[in-house]
Image (cartoon, rainbow, N blue to C red):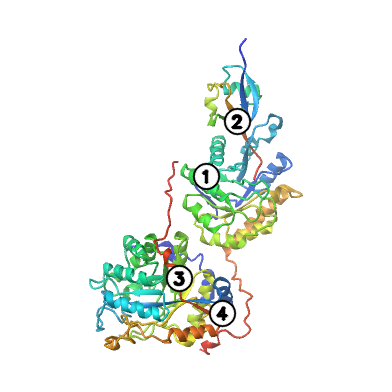
Amino acid sequence: MDSLQLGTYTFSSRLILGTGKFSNSRIMLEAVKASGAQLVTVALRRFNREQAEDDLFGPLSALEGITLMPNTSGASTATEAIRAAHIARELSGSLFIKVEIHPNPQHLMPDPIETYEASRILAKEGFLVMPYIAADPVLAKRLEEVGCTSVMPLGSAIGSGQGLATSEMLNIIIRESGIPVIVDAGLRSPSEAAHAMEMGCEAVLVNSAVAAAGNPPEMAEAFAEAVAAGRKAFRAGLMHKSGSAVATSPLTSFLGTF
Amino acid sequence: MRALPEWLTDDRETAALATMLAPSSSSSLETLAAESRAMTLRRFGRTMTLYAPLYLSNYCSSGCAYCGFASDRKTPRHRLEADEIRLELAAMKKLGISDILLLTGERTAAADFDYLQQCVSLAAEEMQRVSIEAFPMSVGEYRTLADCGCTGITIYQETYNRERYEALHRWGPKKDFIDRLETPARALEGGIKSVGLGVLLGLSDPVEDALSLYRHVRHLGRTYWRAGMSVSFPRMRPQTGGYEPPFPVDDRLLARLIFAFRIALPDTELVLSTRESAAYRDGMAGLGITRMSIESRTTVGGYCESENEESKEKTDKGQFEIYDDRSAKEFCAALRSQNIEPVFKNWEPVYNGPSSSIKPEVESCL
Amino acid sequence: MSQMITIELNGQQQSLPPGSTVSDLLSIISSDGKSMAVVVNEHIIRPEKRSTQILQEGDRVELLIFAGGG
């Protein structure tokens, strides 16, 4: 069976869902259910007694077959991310940690240096580290070297819906990686998710595209189907894409007519 | 007998390459050439990196059925001493060469590691880049060479078909198929910055060998991701001893191999030596090949010949016959007429130390 | 009459009877603390230790939950 292997965990779904930006928890939970996602990412927030229904741990744990992947969004340094990881592990018992360190609140681009440092330390401590990074092939290999479970390069800026703007770099990362590559951030449509899977990604993470859709649960379902289709196509072996290069005069005439 | 590594037979990624190489392939040679040319232009521009080989010694302990220097051949044996090497290097520099490939046979008492190390040090004083094509060494030996200024090694598996390999390498240390296979990894582990791979076309089924070669490149690239990689396409030529290649590769198949490799490995240096004719080399320049040897002598030394009256090399046979024997000047003129810039030097020797791959320790405390 | 102590709870001042434990604090804010992480002065306080962990004047307490986020 073609399952996603992350550390010691095996998943049949290759769609990972983020839980932010939904209008309310109920819709979010419906979307998670509809998507068939088995790995769901959550953020750490201060408990606010006025907004008690913010707490997702209970409702998500009640859903069948869900593994939580806490993320460290909010952290701007490795120290903060590591602290958040310890707290998250304490709370969820999950070994997964998405190292997400974006100090600039405008573009939300991940800090490669803090991310590397946090990942290096957390991997040593036994976490299944899933670092969120720009589509940087060298950074991806360095994170692999320090023991990350996967790398999560962005397709485009969080929430921007610009799709696979980084596809050339993603291709390099996928080609060279020895660990699963999971595209995260910037996907807007299911076809983009299918494309990412066709390129060879092992999974995709989607949040805004589902949360901000007209009908989030339906959109979640569409993404699930697209991810499955893209993966199937990848496994079936896409035909070679011949270039559109055309020479004005024959290039191989020097070879004679053998 | 040690088992073949998994990566050697993993066919998950070779589908595209296999399709381009299949005899029944629908891709015409012209289509592949156009795509190969476009990719070469995009990635490498209009340049050709140039290097020259210097045979340090033709002593050899191995018995490769196809080689003019095999230990049972009657070829007169010679090795260059330090003063001779200095003269050769000076002669090569006069021709404009600054990227050199030092060659020896398999390890012998006459031309052993210490000898090779001294030669590398000498060459590193004069040349911008010093590569070697010698014998498989240990990680420690490669590190020593890297410290002495060796920046690359070339080591051809000859054929990735184990049965054919063992039949062809009749005696000597080269008989060990797996040891040879693991050599590039050991070199990279030892801090050598780049490796050149290849098969000797003609020895075995060329398409099968091409797929294995591709897997080798990809496998090394994943683990040694800082490494420079190049692929050569040495094609069997007539030589002393008269070995008839059982799987001759014609011009069109060689071209197809080169185009397919360029398309499948867009960033990899592809190398064509003076085994090929002037017309062939001129044709392939710009279509996929990005590195070529020039002014080659495949006899021991040989660059001083024109300067040295008492040359004894005139009666010596080289390892293989040169086909393109144009001078550097003529060859560069030919490149320029095609709007390709010959590049003799694209490196500063101050960077010639061992590769700085500092692998952090990875332990799990779980 | 015993003086109340003041701690910092999620960045805000909170008064507590002296000798209050973490469990007591959770009761005061009407939470059973089940799906909550408790951090006192950078130390994570596990559920089994909450009834014995006594809070001191000036302690910085963070109560954290999982909430929506990508």
Q: Image check: A24 left or right of C25?
A: right
The tag on residue B307 is: none
- Please determine if labels 2 and 1 lie on a single subunit: no
CA–CA distance between discs 3 and 1? Answer: 36 Å
Residue A84 spot, x, y in % from top left:
57, 38
The tag on residue B230 is: 3
Q: Image check: A135 left or right of B165?
A: right
Q: Which residue is mark 1?
A: A118
CA–CA distance between discs 3 and 4? Answer: 19 Å
The answer to whether the residue labelled 4 contacts the one labelled 1, judged by CB atoms less than 8 Å apart, is no
Residue C28 spot, x, y in % from top left:
65, 21
Which residue shows up at 64% across the image and 75% down it?
A244
Residue C2 spot, x, y in % from top left:
61, 12
Q: Which residue is mark 4?
A: B33
- Please determine if labels 4 and 1 lie on a single subunit: no
Judging from the image, what secondary structure is the residue with disc 1 in? helix
Q: Look at label 2 and name its amino acid.
A: Glu
Residue A147 spot, x, y in % from top left:
47, 49
Q: Look at label 4 and name its amino acid.
A: Ala
CA–CA distance between discs 2 and 3? Answer: 56 Å
- Please determine if labels 3 and 1 lie on a single subunit: no
Q: Look at label 3 and name its amino acid.
A: Ser
Name the image quarter holding the N terminus of chain B: bottom left
Judging from the image, mark 1 belongs to the subunit labelled: A
